[in-house]
Image (spheres, rainbow, N blue to C red):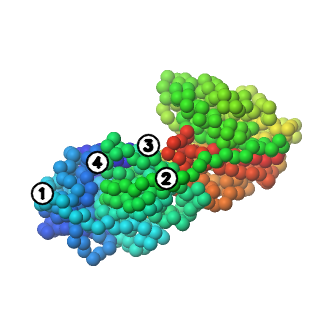
Amino acid sequence: MPSSVPRTAAVSALVATALAAGLLAGSSSASAAEVRIHGIQGSGRISPLVGTPVADVPGIVTGVRTYGSRGFWFQDPNPDRDAATSEGIFVFTNAVPTVAVGDSVKVSGTVTEYVPGGATSGNQSLTQISSPKITVVSSGNKLPAPVTISAKSVPAAYAPKGSAATGNSINGLQLKPRSYALDYYESLEGMNVRVGTSRVVGATDPYSELWVTVKPSENANRRGGTVYGGYDDQNTGRIQIQQLAPAAEQPFPKADVGDVLSGSTEGPLDFNQFGGYTLTARTLGEVTGDGAKPETTRAQRRDELAVATYNVENLDPSDPQEKFDALAGAVVKNLSSPDILALEEIQDDNGATDDGTVSADATIAKFTAAIVAAGGPAYEARTVDPENKTDGGEPGGNIRQVFLFNPERVSFTDRPGGHATTATEAVRQDGKAGLSLSPGRIDPTNAAWKDSRKPLAGEFAFRGKPVVVIANHFGSKGGDESLVSHHQPPNRISEAQRHLQAKAVNTFVKDLLKIQRSADVLVVGDINDFEFSATTKALTADGALYPAIKSLPAPERYSYVYQGNSQVLDQILTSPAIEDFDYDSVHINAEFADQNSDHDPQVLRFRP
């Protein structure tokens, strides 16, 4: 939870580690006499006075945080003329602060650079005063006028590029707040800022925060979101909103993508581990508007095969029946009961209980029963149980992919022998490409799948024609640096495994196509990567597959919303024979505060 991560004595150790690693530049010779806040902040990301004691720094308190990372912000009412130097700063008190908004104070302490998430996270640091001694000079003072963050004030370019000499770090660069969005936000770190009426682009989450954009036309889509279309096309107008008042005292508003945060939202600009630059609202606007509505895809025609993929977010029998009913209702109503449904994140029969259980029969039975109760078909299921604790995910949960299929519309070609570590192969069956094991796993002992879900392949028949479906759940983005990293571009270390996984699947598909170039093959699932990524390029190498989501207009390409970016994680890719298809990313979860899963399902219809 971003607003409740405590700062302990480990903070100084983190700063020391960062200094030793060259991430933060210190100055032992800077004078501590008559220092003002802009002198502490300096014109770069790292204070020129880091590690230095300062005395009687004057300013007006603009915000107080009494929980989580406890402390207060204060700001110099007499700014300098340098746009690069912030006039505000956070004072880390550890204990509940005894000051109030509007107090004129003098603060003595040590200048430190706190790295949210630790020095190895790649995050930028927050300049602050630690171990403070505070003198209240007067109370009830007028606050410094807020700086309005707007479409005009935020530059179009996202960030300067780091150099190879600094390991791509931008920490040592002077800020250019009129040139780069990250520099602009950094130049306001700790200051009293405001946003006017702004569109919500990231729904309220369980941690009482949401995202807005101050650039309403920036990569906007018809449902109110801001689409993430490329590494070199960052959405600079996004900003996270939290409130200073504890949610127990002042409930945080519930907002969906497409709603509007109306009026003025004002408070200090913080930087945290879970989103970077964050307006910590002293006064919060009102959520208005009608927001986005859940979508419903059309039903497949009689001669169309409908194949869908849906990440159901760690589903297991201990989940409340309401979750099963909601997910099942979505399959029937919003997805119009697809013929084949590939599920990701089906857990074993006792969920996160770590006792060696790997079967998911009870989970599947409860879900398929809920679908029938919702008015859907009596789906049959096929899967291959994983080995215990080998496929990643929640410890003890043993997540896996599962095929559901409607036996009234499609049949499954069972070829026994599939096992957690036994590979299925591409083989010739009656002159056509097929699978040696169905269901079976693709190359499960390949190191690419270490601590990750192995692809599940199944052979189906629709109106007498074979169709091979490969259900995937590639490695997560865990460990990647955030978009606001001090490395620009950020390090995306998780990609390496996904590239290997994509290569393995691509090789398998090409083996099928060598046998039958006209084979109908679908690669579906939570790919955990963008349609423009190197992972997708590896999947589609040599024309083996096409990312079908690219058939949609660019503003409609997304299945997930993260930090205000509507982006692609879930995909369906088609073999060359599947030329004429109808694709739909069915938006029922990612844009909403109330979610049954954090992913939107994908559906593809075609005539085999």
Q: Secondary structure at mark 3?
A: loop
Residue bearing the label numbered 1: 135
Nearest the eye: 157 or 245: 245
Query: Which residue matches tag 2?
Result: 202
- Does the image show residue 36? yes
Relative horizontal placement of residue 28, taking residue 285 as reference (left or right): left
Of the residues under marks 3 and 4, which one precedes in the sequence? 4
Structural distance between the alpha carbons of marks 1 and 4: 21 Å
Which mark lies nearer to you, 1 or 4? 1
Say what amino acid the circle numbered 3 marks: Pro
Disc 2 to disc 4: CB gap under 8 Å: no
- Kindly identify the residue that appears in the image at 31 percent across and 59 percent down: 268
User: Where residue 206 is drawn, which disc sits there?
Assistant: 3
Q: Quadrant of the N terminus?
A: top left
- Whole-angstrom CA distance, mark 3 to mark 4, is 18 Å
> Residue at 38% across / 61% down in the picture?
264
Q: Secondary structure at mark 4?
A: loop
- Mark linked to residue 69: 4
Tell which circle, 1 or 4, labels the residue nearer the N-terminal end: 4
Q: Amino acid at mark 4?
A: Ser
- Crowdedness of circle 2 by 10 Å Cα count: few (<14), some, many (20+)? many
Q: Nearer the viewer, mark 3 or mark 4?
A: 3
SS class, disc 2: strand
The mark lying in front, picked from 2 and 4, is 2
- Image position, residue 248 (x, y; %): 33, 41
- Farthest-out residue, bottom: 81
Residue 74 percent location from the top left of the image: 23, 60
* Marks 2 and 4, how far apart at CA: 24 Å
- Which badge, 2 or 1, is on the more N-terminal residue? 1
Residue type at numbered disc 2 = Gly
> CA separation, marks 1 and 3?
37 Å
Q: Position of residue 277 (x, y in %)?
A: 38, 58
